[in-house]
Image: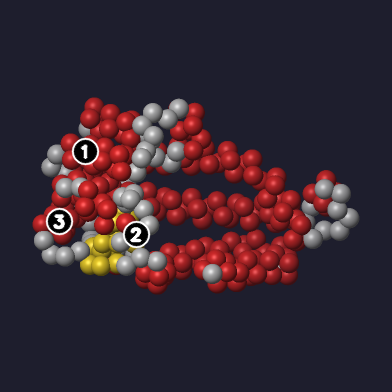
């Protein structure tokens, strides 16, 4: 239902833009998708996520005090900390940030809180804060915006190229069939780009690990947290390097622990 409510107007708008706005369609479509993505990121934690999970403020106590103390120590503005009932769907543990600017909030899965010590939880959140401090979040947004723009630009070139339709034995050019043909031809390019994106993501993970390990009291808290996360999330400890290169956005846990233990 959410896909229909959110996706159908966007899809209809893009098709309309591509069909009736001529040479400037790719720019207008690009802008529309970027604005839509930013709006969804803003409303998701406030109105969409609470439809599926309950968000309860973290109670006052040792954990809340430790998190706020660490955030203040590294100069990270933090407004709220919530616990999400992730255990009703999965035993996996997770933590994530929501919101922008001074309205940033931390969401901790209840399974994460139950399975980790206070120091380990601070280490996990230090890793996430490391992504902010290293500008990985802004980097990801910029790459996503540029990527979307490139796709729309290439799309504008292909949709008006008669050779594309001739290759598929189509007599008439159509926006709808052109989108299908373009998707088929672009898939290999997207696969190659995903290799580069995964590589960059793994580099960013190492950097966030280093930030966490060097800003918490004991880097072993980070190592222990990674071990527990690997166990609870049933991670593959020894994946093949080629499989990692193709599919992994995070380095294998063993590689992360070795890097923290030896180079921090």
Q: Residue at x 33, y 50 (%)?
A: 91
**Contact, CB < 8 Å: mark 3 with mark 1?**
no
- Seen at 32% across and 56% down, the residue is 87
Inter-mark Cα distance, 2 to 3: 22 Å
Whether residue 2 is visible here, answered yes or no, is yes
Taking the spot 22% from the left edge, 48% from the top edge, the residue there is: 115
**Is disc 2 in contact with disc 3, using a CB cutoff of under 8 Å?**
no
Closer-to-camera residue (137/113): 113
SS assignment at label 3: helix
Dividing the picture into quadrants, the one containing residue 264 is top left
Which residue lies under the disc numbered 1? 224
> In the rendered view, does 126 fall on the left or right side of 27?
left
Q: Which residue is mark 2?
A: 88
Q: How far across and down, in percent of the image, does residue 5 sit?
A: 55, 72
Residue holding disc 3: 63
At label 1, counting other C-alpha atoms closer than 10 Å, the crowd grade (few under 14, some 14-19, many 20 or more) is some
């Amino acid at each position: 239902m959410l896909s229909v409510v959110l996706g159908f107007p966007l899809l209809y708008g893009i098709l309309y833009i591509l069909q009736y706005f001529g040479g400037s369609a790719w720019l207008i479509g690009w802008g529309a998708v970027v604005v839509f993505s930013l709006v969804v990121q803003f409303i998701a934690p406030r109105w969409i996520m609470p439809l599926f999970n309950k968000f309860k403020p973290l109670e006052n106590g040792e954990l809340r005090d430790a998190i706020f103390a660490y955030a203040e120590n590294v100069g990270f503005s933090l407004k709220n900390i919530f616990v999400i009932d992730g255990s009703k769907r999965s035993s996996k543990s997770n933590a994530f940030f929501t919101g922008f600017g001074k309205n940033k909030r931390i969401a901790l899965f209840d399974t994460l809180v139950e399975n980790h010590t206070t120091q380990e939880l601070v280490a996990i959140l230090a890793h996430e804060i490391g992504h902010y401090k290293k500008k990985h979040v802004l980097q990801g947004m910029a790459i996503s915006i540029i990527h979307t723009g490139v796709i729309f630009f290439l799309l504008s070139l292909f949709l008006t190229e008669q050779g594309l339709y001739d290759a598929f034995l189509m007599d008439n050019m159509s926006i709808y069939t052109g989108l299908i043909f373009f998707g088929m031809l672009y898939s290999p390019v997207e696969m190659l780009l995903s290799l580069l994106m995964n590589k960059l993501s793994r580099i960013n993970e190492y950097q966030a690990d280093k930030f966490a390990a060097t800003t918490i009291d004991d880097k072993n808290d980070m190592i222990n947290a990674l071990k527990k996360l690997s166990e609870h999330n049933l991670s593959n400890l020894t994946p093949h390097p080629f499989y990692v290169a193709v599919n992994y956005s995070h380095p294998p846990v063993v590689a992360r622990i070795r890097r923290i233990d030896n180079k921090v």
